[in-house]
Amino acid sequence: MPRQKKAHASESRKPTARGAATRGRIVEAAADLVYRQGASGTSLEDIMAASATSKSQVYHYFADKDGLMRAVIELQTRRVTGDHAAMLKTVDSLQGLRRWADGVIAMNKAAGGAGGCPLGSLASELADRSESAREMLALGFARWESHLVTALRAMRDRGELKREARPEDLATTMIAALEGGLLLAQTTHETRPLELALGMAIEHVARACV
Amino acid sequence: MPRQKKAHASESRKPTARGAATRGRIVEAAADLVYRQGASGTSLEDIMAASATSKSQVYHYFADKDGLMRAVIELQTRRVTGDHAAMLKTVDSLQGLRRWADGVIAMNKAAGGAGGCPLGSLASELADRSESAREMLALGFARWESHLVTALRAMRDRGELKREARPEDLATTMIAALEGGLLLAQTTHETRPLELALGMAIEHVARACV
DNA sequence: TCGCAACTGGACTGTCAAGTCCATTATTCG
DNA sequence: CGAATAATGGACTTGACAGTCCAGTTGCGA
């Protein structure tokens, strides 16, 4: 019996350009809605309407809602890590790190404090409810962290950061501060908690400088 | 027309002891389920089953599901602020603060990193979806912060903290670190991010010491 | 150009959840 | 005691939503 595994669209078929575009439209619409309303607060019909697709299209590309949500996590992870990779690419100093943080703060200010982190809100909602989602999100955070680690290592190589400093740990605290600050900003509708938290994290890095 | 406002049970009636107990059972069951499954992931029937009540009882004490969710927020806020008020009551030194942090970490370790913060997960889910919920949660965080501020002020009064230090800002960063650390712990199922984040926050306080 | 497979439209089903309603049973208090 | 009101049981309505099904169309490759 040659591969009768009933393989689903999302794997092992041969999508055309049109099909790939449709799939992309669905995931993007889903990601935006889920960002604003949460996964369980977003219905497939919402997504169909926002992406101008029909039910059969959604089920052609995804096994079920969970499968679509996994694709959403993947997209948001790509977006966040991509954005920060670009912002951090040239960062190799405390000054550069400060500018990166200022960029994050400016974005939050533009949103009036609301919104929160796309990865953070997904993690909070799904981490304890779906093991596969949790793993994907953990991986996403790890990838994000790795870009910070790269910047911190560059600082160390330049001699700004002490040789015994641990870039991995510093990156973890940076993201924790960012996520916590964003959550408080989202709740209070003020950017100040984020500013304070990121300020603390950067000071923490400064303490590990020579 | 004397006060025909169609006032609901949760206000302006006179509940008996039995009624108050029933109401309490409902809210507690709801709080536990919502903590594990989220608000939109928890149905009234789940809550009815867990609290051994019927639909008419739920609607006797709460106008609708939103009203019940507000009561849940209130309960969780009371719980969290109560717990931390007790833990922080006698704290007036960096040492005491460290012990408090160790207690938080131990609790998280006992849960295998999972769970997250009851207020944090509610905030992440509801802050952008219900203005009244957002306000209640902001108030809850503020009350929580105030207990930390009290401890920090005690440190300042004892002369351990610099006089120009800002207890309010330090408390904000402490909670941001805690929430961010908890989120990462929940996602990675490891306690380490929380340890690192709280370590950073306490070091941050230490930097403001004389 | 022919045939197969990718793609799409949309009706239909079954389930589950929120909220309504009314009848019945306690409890309080004059 | 005996109204008035609190408390409860549970059936019922209404709507929304995930997922199924099939008929029809488009497009690619031999």
Image (spheres, coloured by chain):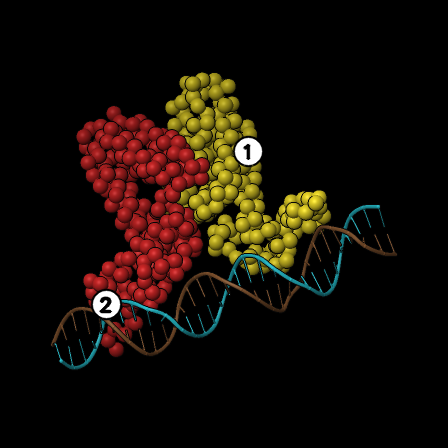
Chain colours: A red, B yellow, C cyan, D brown
Return the residue at label 2.
A13
Tell me, yes or no, whether the two marked residues, 2 and 1, touch with CB atoms within 8 Å: no
Q: Is disc 1 on the same chain as disc 2?
A: no
x, y (%) of residue A142?
30, 45
Name the chain letter of the residue that bears numbered label 2: A
> Horizontal and vertical percent for residue A120?
37, 45
Q: Secondary structure at mark 2?
A: loop
- Please state which amino acid type lies under the numbered disc 1: Ala
Kind of residue sitting beneath label 2: Arg
A154 sits left or right of B149 in the view: left
Q: Quadrant of the N terminus of chain B?
A: top right
> Which residue reaches farthest front?
B1
Q: Chain of mark 1?
A: B
Report the residue at 38% width, 55% height from top. A131
The residue located at (35%, 60%) in the rendering is: A48
Disc sitting over residue B85 in the figure:
1
Looking at the image, can residue B72 be seen? no
Numbered tag placed on residue B72 in the rendering? none
Q: CA distance from mark 2 to mark 1?
A: 59 Å
State whether residue A173 is above or below residue B72. Answer: above
Crowding at dot 1, Cα within 10 Å, few <14 / some 14-19 / many 20+, comes out as many
Q: Is residue B94 above or below residue B192?
A: above
Q: Is residue A8 left or right of residue B203?
A: left
Q: Residue at x 70, y 50 (%)?
A: B18
As helix, strand or loop, the secondary structure at mark 1 comes to helix
